[in-house]
Amino acid sequence: MVAIAPFQALRYDLERVRLSDALCPPYDIISASARAQLCARSSYNFVRLELPEEDGDADRYTAARRLLESWRQQRILVQDAQPSIYLTEHAFRWAGQRWSRLGWISLLRFTPPLAEGTLIDQSSGVGLKRIDRSSNRPPLVARGAGFTGSTADQVLRHEATFDAPKADRAKLLETVRAQLSPIFCIVPDADHQVQAFLTRLAQADLPTAMAALGPSDGQETVRLWPITDPQAIAGLQQLIARGRALVADGHHRFAVACSHRHLCEGVMTYFACSDDPAVQVHPIHRVVHGAAINPAAWQAHLQELCDWEPAASVEDGWQRLSRADGVGSFLYYTPPQAAVVRVRGEVLAQFARDTSLPQRLAQLDVTILHHLLLPRLAGSGLPVEAVRYTPDFREAVQMTQEAQLACAWGLRPLPLGTVFELASQQLALPQKSTYFYPKAPAGLVVYSLD
């Protein structure tokens, strides 16, 4: 089963703080310049906790703990009196259309909770660690930690995780003793019962908090309703209990929460329904730059491997790519030319025979790019830092134009059903294969462990 639970969130006191100035994106998509802009919006912007910096004698984690304590003492952040599930509406514009996504924030509950004395598998070659609740320093599980109990098999993950970001989020959790931002999960809703239930809840009362997100106020907004009614909470719990949840965003925070599951009841999670058209899965495009790039030589080599279809413009190229059938098609751009490239059938067949990857993964565009085309073009001399990523192809074009030697690769989106299918087979997608949009903002609610 997928088990959810209400909790008593810390939330901004809206008489003291303008919520539109206080929210921020998740930590992993905040650049240095974006952080500075968020800090300039308000001295209470949540980025100071979500992505903290050193402050005098305090390291970044200690600085975040002190700041959270200060905000609680000043009642900038106040704990709700009753456990709640937090219904949210996230409205945004994309491709000239207005979208509205209903979801909720609750705990994705660990079942059963771990008891005093339980042994945790650290999955790091150093054996087992016994839980001691008297310690303020919980054991850090760097790899492989998961749920115990029935919830484990019902939470699907589709991305690999890495030690450095897990260590960062673990240190922040241990020091601040709070889950600061929710992970993002998708639950099935083929019969639309969950969506109808959420709609009825939203129509029953006015939201208690509203905010505009980003620099263009009004383009993206969020509204929030705390749901405290036990019958409503039980109804939602029953509707999703038999389904499976897909981690869309926040795999590192999910892993860290699991490794610290002896300290908390669950992981704070934003949920949305898979059949909601406002749940959007966008591709993440690639920009390859540096001395390894030889545009003329790459074009010649690509024309040996692929059918090459010049485009009149980037927009024309996107239209052509959207009509392409099969796998192995990309929008290739090197200033000032755009073209649609389609890997030839015999090349794909040879790759399928030679690769050690699972065949289902070998059929993905992103796999073909990173395991077939780029190695053929650059050999083994392409360093990791030579590839940059963005979900906005306009930004990819600009990055390519600003670099001395660069090319951009536009990818098609992976259908959500494909992501579910691969995750259910425990197949991890290549790094940065999906961009679930829009992200759940940080700062709406905080799950305190104290």
Image (cartoon, rainbow, N blue to C red):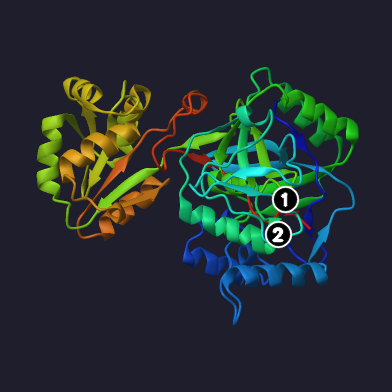
Of 339 and 30, which appears nearest the observer? 30
Q: Please name the residue shown 56% across and 71% down the image.
A: 53
Whole-angstrom CA distance, mark 2 to mark 1, is 9 Å
* 372 to the left or right of 202: left
Q: Please name the residue shown 64% across and 64% down the image.
A: 49
Image-quadrant location for residue 400: bottom left
* 188 to the left or right of 415: right
Q: Position of residue 276 (x, y in %)?
A: 62, 28
Mark 2 lies on a secondary structure that is loop
- Callouts 2 and 1 close, C-beta under 8 Å: yes
Q: Position of residue 441 (x, y in %)?
A: 63, 51
Q: Position of residue 142 (x, y in %)?
A: 52, 50
Mark 1 lies on a secondary structure that is loop
Q: Is residue 13 visible?
A: no
Q: Position of residue 258 (x, y in %)?
A: 63, 44
* 209 to the left or right of 92: right
Give the residue pinned by disc 2.
177
The single residue placed furthest to the top in the displayed view is: 191
Give the residue pinned by disc 1.
263
Tell which circle, 2 or 1, labels the residue nearer the N-terminal end.
Answer: 2
Q: Quadrant of the C terminus?
A: bottom right
Could you say which disc has been placed on residue 449 in the image?
A: none
Reply above or below: 375 against 129.
above
Circle 1 packing at 10 Å, graded few (<14), some (14-19), many (20+), is: many
Q: Is residue 283 visible?
A: yes
Query: For the residue marked with disc 2, what is the amino acid?
Result: Arg
Q: Please name the residue shown 52% across and 44% down the image.
A: 123
Circle 2 packing at 10 Å, graded few (<14), some (14-19), many (20+), is: some
